[in-house]
Image (spheres, rainbow, N blue to C red):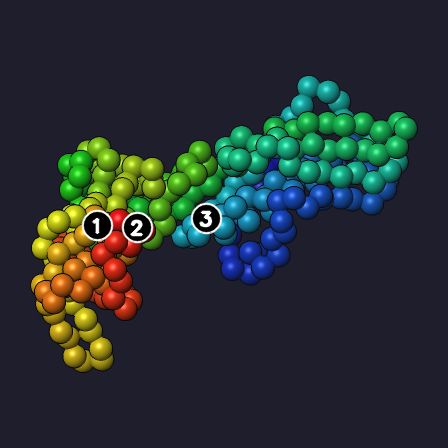
Amino acid sequence: MFNKCIVTVSAAMLLFCIPISQVFSASAPVAAEQVPGMVEAAARQHVVRWAEAAGLSEPQVSVTVLPGTRPLAACGQAVTVQGADTRLPSRMRFIAVCAGANGWRYEFIVRALVSARIAVMASDVAAGKVLADEDVLLERHDISAISDSISDPQEAVGMSGKRTLRAGEILRKGLLSAPTMVKRGEPVRIVARREQIEVSMAGEALDAGARGDTVRVRNANGTVIRARVTGAATVEPVSAPVTASSPSE
């Protein structure tokens, strides 16, 4: 017999999630037909917690406990259920144990279907080209077997594909890399902002870096500063002057 539960994950439910390492248990006695339900509850709570940790947008979860080949038996003692392999929701293993001299140990295979609104490609984009807002959109997809989907399109915008990305393709973190915005030895614009005032000056990058990286830059006065890469050939100061012979050279 299959045990199946479909649930839409809500913020209220997430408040009651428990750690994966926690053991699920039921007081004695436990009827044989109760055991799959215990496994289902354990698996469902794990997947909900997984969805929360992944920051999924509007996740929906369906959990199925597959029937085993051995007949289930009642347990006169407390029954505990714990995850044995929960790396991917699409195929998990849970162990139910009946304590005591006449106890038993059953292994269950549990499959969860998880869908969520995730980032997908709106059009074809060549490898190495920086993704713009119009290149990425949100769609609902099954991500049960995907561990590195992207829920916020802004996480992908500004990145580039390691290969050509096709329209409709699910964006995965492993497919993207941060493009080099500042190259060592090339001129950069140093932009300092404070309230409504902006001051800029020319400089030379002493390190290469992607957006968000901190690099060394020599300004027009010959002073070496640390600066954060904010765009193509553009940086903003983040520290006091440093020596050109810094250990990061």
Give the foreground label among 1 and 2: 2
Q: Is residue 179 above or below residue 241?
A: above
Q: Is residue 46 left or right of residue 59?
A: right
Q: Residue at x 27, y 42 (%)?
A: 177
Could you classify mark 3 by the number of other residues whose Cα lies within 10 Å: few (under 14), some (14-19), or many (20 or more)? some
Which amino acid lies under the numbered mark 2 shown in the image of this protein? Ser
Q: Secondary structure at mark 3?
A: helix
Mark 1 vs 2: CB contact within 8 A: yes
Q: Earlier in the sequence, mark 1 or mark 2?
A: 1
Q: Earlier in the sequence, mark 3 or mark 2?
A: 3
Distance of label 3 from label 1 (alpha carbons): 33 Å
Q: Earlier in the sequence, mark 3 or mark 1?
A: 3
Residue 19 place in picture, x, y as percent? 62, 49
Residue 112 place in picture, x, y as percent? 52, 36
**Image quadrant containing the N terminus:** top right
Give the foreground label among 3 and 1: 1
Which amino acid lies under the numbered mark 1 shown in the image of this protein? Asp
- Residue 54's disc is 3
Residue 235 seen: no
Q: Is residue 229 left or right of residue 9?
A: left
Mark 3 vs 1: CB contact within 8 A: no
Residue 232: image quadrant is bottom left
Residue 120 place in picture, x, y as percent? 28, 43
Could you classify mark 1 by the number of other residues whose Cα lies within 10 Å: few (under 14), some (14-19), or many (20 or more)? some
Q: Is residue 55 left or right of residue 48?
A: left
Which amino acid lies under the numbered mark 3 shown in the image of this protein? Ala
Distance of label 1 from label 2 (alpha carbons): 9 Å
Q: Residue at x 27, y 68 (%)?
A: 240
Residue 54 place in picture, x, y as percent? 46, 48
Q: Which residue is mark 2?
A: 248
Q: Which residue is mark 1?
A: 207
